[in-house]
Image: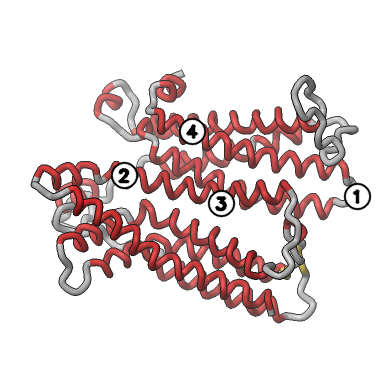
Amino acid sequence: MLALRLARGAHPLVQLRRLLVAAASAGTGFLLLCTLGYAMGHPDASGGAVLRLAWCVAPIAATVYFAVTVARTDPATKPRSGLSAVGLGPARLTVLAAISTAVACTLGSMVALLFFLHLRGDLTGLPFDGASADLLAAGQPLPLGAALTLLALVPLIASAASAAVLRPRTARPGARHGGKPDAVQDEATAPDAPAAPPSGLPWGVALLAAGLAVETYASRSPGSSGLTMPGGLTASPAGVLAGWALTAVGLALAGPGLTYLCGRILQAVRPGAMRLLAGRGLQEEARRIGRPLGVLCVVGSGAYAALTLYSGDRPAMGPLTTLGALLVAGCAVLTLATAAIDAKHARSDTTSALLQLGAPASMLRGTAALRAGTLAAVFGPLTWAVAELAALPLAG
């Protein structure tokens, strides 16, 4: 009940984010139910049904990541002194965040179930009754237990991931400056000390190189087993897809480190006030926006590689493949937008202080444009290079 009251009193932008989470959950749930319908209509093609279910992992991961980002940026999940006085400490707020995430995802799953039943013809009285009856095995009874199990995947995974990410962490006594705890140290030294660099850049680069090597080796290995890709795309060796998965994980891990490195580059060689502010801003926001930037690079490089690989003879992509691609790309863009808005709110106090000190608004706008331009100049060519290297073994 308390989670419902907090949700009702939230800002309209927060409500919009929750509705977008519900929409993403609805799309993913519909894909899972369509996989169930294919398995019901083709009982002899169990391998194809399992492969279709495996291809739903990408939309599930994108939806869960977006839901966790929304839960992390939700103002209702942030500790406040007044809430602690009534017994709502960090642990209780984590539970409320997990419940809110589960409610939003469950709402989307129920919408997916209603839409699925409507297209099967089980629900009548609306336009397009039974429009996909043949594809969704309308002549067979729907196994309710299997359908509910598939629909419960996104709410359960998203709520568990939100609870794991937002769980309260105790401050370590070993501090970087004078033995202060981390929270006290960040507050005390934020004006004159940049944030510590993220530690995932070496691992990300290593996984990126390993993924490209595995993909190249697998594409040249004779007799390698192939997996049929969605949308009628040409079958690719399983090792190539495993290498692409390693490449994707490497890009996501390297995102925060690359963002921090962009901040260092901006501050190099006698920086002025604008470059100094932009560089320090990127260093402070590296962990907040770096990972979504890396994920967006993964999606962009995958799309670019597919368009390059099939530029001459593009196969006809079905509606379910298009829905899955739109879900993954949309969740990646919305996750980055949510993280960017949260970063803007996080530096609102600094922006207000600079304005009170007499800094012109044009300089602050120029600083924001400089940050965005630097990130585009680094991550854009990186996305293109990874896409070209990933498509090269398949093209050969």
Q: Distance between the residues labelled 2 and 1?
A: 54 Å
Instruction: Tell me the mark number nearer the camera, choosing from 1 and 4.
Output: 4
* Residue 18 tag number: 4
Find the distance from the CA under tag 2 to the CA under tag 3: 36 Å
Mark 4 or mark 2, earlier in chain:
4
Please tell me how crowded label 3 is: few (under 14), some (14-19), or many (20+) other residues with Cα within 10 Å: many
Q: Which mark is residue 44?
A: 1
| Rendered view: 153 above or below 277 | above
Q: In the rendered image, which quarter is residue 200 located in?
A: bottom left
Q: Tell which circle, 2 or 3, labels the residue nearer the N-terminal end.
A: 2
Specify the farthest residue to the left: 357
Circles 2 and 1 in contact, beta carbons < 8 Å? no
Residue 102 sits in quarter: top right
Q: Distance between the residues labelled 4 and 3?
A: 18 Å
Amino acid on which the number 2 mark rests in the picture: Thr
Mark 2 Cα shell of 10 Å, populated few (<14), some (14-19), many (≥20): few
- Residue 329: assigned label: 3
